[in-house]
Amino acid sequence: MFGYMGKILRVNLTSGSISEEVPDETDLKMFLGGAGLATKYLFDEVPKGTDPLGPDNKLIFMTGPMTGTSSPSTGRFSVVAKSPLTGFWGQANSGGFWGRDFKRSGFDGVIFEGKAEKPVYLVTDNGKIELRDASHLWGKSTSETTAKIKEDLGDKFNVACIGIAGENQVKYAAIMNDVEGKYWGRAAGRCGLGTVMGAKNLKAIASRGRIPIEIAEKEEYREKAKERFDWVNQSLLKVTLEVFGTAAILDMVNQRGGLPSRNWQTGYVEEYEKINGEAINDTILVGEKACFACPIACGRVSDIKDGKYKSKGEGPEYESIGAFGSMCDIYDLNAITKAHFLCNEYGIDTISAGATIAFAMEAVEKGILTDTKGSEIKFGDPDVIIELVHKIAKREGIGDFLAEGSKAMSETLGQGSEKFAMHVKGLELPAYDSRAAKITGLAYATANRGGDHITAYIEGPAFMSMPFLIVDEGEVDEDGLLEIPEEARVVKEYEDAFGVFDALSGCKFMGMVLTGEDWADLIQSLLGYEFTEKDFRLLGERIYNLERAFNVREGLTRDDDTLPGRLLEDPLPDGPAEGQIVNLDPMLDAYYQYRGWDKNGRPSEETLTKLELNWLINRM
């Protein structure tokens, strides 16, 4: 099994038993690894209607065949489970070095089932496995947990863990890895998979390994990987992200009128220069941080040197700036950064946290949320975001309500608040207003995990006027669909291509520089069998339809492929996109036709047969 370790761990937390199994070679060719293979396990093993926080849900960590190899930016891993935030397919993805270290400890993935009677953590060490008591770690932050485990096991171990947000069942709790100290870490942040981890009484996974990864054509792969590394290293993307990090895009989004402000009431802000990449560089930046084998180093190391927010840690990223900054009408960079740091420490998804706080601010402003348990929640108050992050993690006061997420909050509050609860399928939206770039609205609406910018990273090209390099160059009307808008095909192509990255465990920024043909050629030399660009695209389409089938089985319909009422009905009041709304239905009709789905968004038998997914036909 070139590219693989050839072993999947299965840990029954209820009984404490651990077993090893060899992944099916047909499944590896059909779904590759990472989120693709994990979703196959999830569909097969998690019954319809399973409680996401019950023992029957499976929590699956999975690396891909490129994880830990010399290909650029391939240190990533995926976590898959039924999401407690959305009730649908949940997937979170993280970078750093933990994916490499877990894989080189001898395993491609681990499937957790059941629930431990008391807190535990898993150790994987060069082929050896052990389940250890974690009672002494329960109630500790991510940095405290990591430090204690390294004290017990040794500094060479890398740790993925939850903080108290996961323990307290905050519905958007994250899993943090590569935590080097207080306020540090990379996050598998979306969909509340840290919540699932906490529900299973699983505190952490600690891994160490030096086991080599077998590669089919070693020299050829090494040369091709170096070539692609050099291409990325010489790209404009590398220069931009290395200098300004992901915050580089903030200026361009704002200039298009798409930077959500005051919970998406406007899309353009005058004070953007106080929180953009240049402001970070001028005030708090002290270093850059790269993931494994990454030529870009988009991670930020920041130091708030004085004042009440004094602290040092990793971040913030663009999404944290948008969520805690403009969405909450806050332009105090130190406060935004401190809120981001606290999310690292507690293990919280910054997007969902900031967006939910922004929703609460507007609900209070409109007189819909009246009982705030003593917290004064209002737009523009830097201190309130710090206070609320603490309360959310601890489920104290109004934080207990906010910990449920904006969808659940709006369903409880009613009174029209559903219109400005900014989520899709229960997952809060990232900081790109689709009224300023409508293609992003289609991408949000159709993303299998909900309101998400990474399922199809369409926002980069849309707001930065970049070429859609990863898109097939074929004719738009190749299937006789001349009337279909071009945008719908682009979204479909992006979803498929980036699904392959999640299966490989590669960084999606690479899709901004390298084409599908570039990746197919590299995959072939890694795995040792013919793999063409057509195979690359077919694989992504197959994985995407499998994820969709899981959601359809759980009750998803066309009504779930929609956007918040604010984006569909309320024109932007000012800025470059003034007067714009998203007219979603025509794009959605076109998208479904390109996908080969019916008008309700259900994959057709013909489509499933084409993708060799016939076995799904009677299981949705």
Image (tube, grey):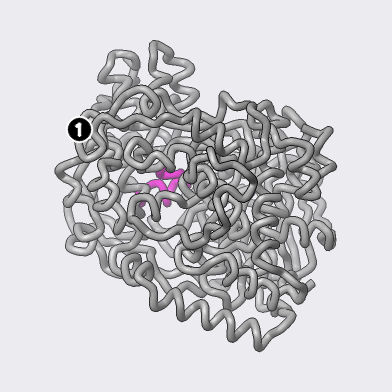
Name, please, the residue furthest toward the left.
270
Residue 346: say if magenta. yes
Measuring 65% from the left and 54% from the top, which residue is drawn there?
540
As drawn, is 164 to the left or to the right of 35?
left
Q: Position of residue 120 (x, y in %)?
A: 66, 50
Measuring 18% from the left and 60% from the top, which residue is drawn there?
283
Q: Looking at the image, is 583 positioned above or below residue 290?
A: above
Q: Position of residue 565 (x, y in %)?
A: 41, 23
Measuring 68% from the left and 46% from the top, which residue is drawn there?
59
Q: Quadrant of residue 597?
A: top right
Q: Position of residue 146 (x, y in %)?
A: 52, 59
Task: Tell me the SS state at disc 1.
Answer: loop
Q: Is residue 119 visible?
A: no
Q: Looking at the image, is 301 positioned above or below residue 555?
A: below
Q: Is residue 521 visible?
A: yes
Rendered-image quadrant of the C terminus = top right
| Image: magenta residue range | 340-351
The amino acid marked with disc number 1 is Asp
Name, please, the residue furthest toward the top.
415
Q: Circle 1 sits on which residue?
A: 574
Measuring 43% from the left and 42% from the top, which residue is drawn there?
439
- 75 or 250, which is in the foreground? 250
Q: Position of residue 332 (x, y in %)?
A: 19, 46
Q: Quadrant of residue 480?
A: top right
Magenta region's main secondary structure? helix
The mark tally for this picture is 1
- 340 or 227, which is in the foreground? 227
- 216 or 156, which is in the foreground? 216
As drawn, is 167 to the left or to the right of 124?
left
- 276 or 103, which is in the foreground? 276
Rendered-image quadrant of the N terminus = bottom right
Residue 341: say if magenta. yes
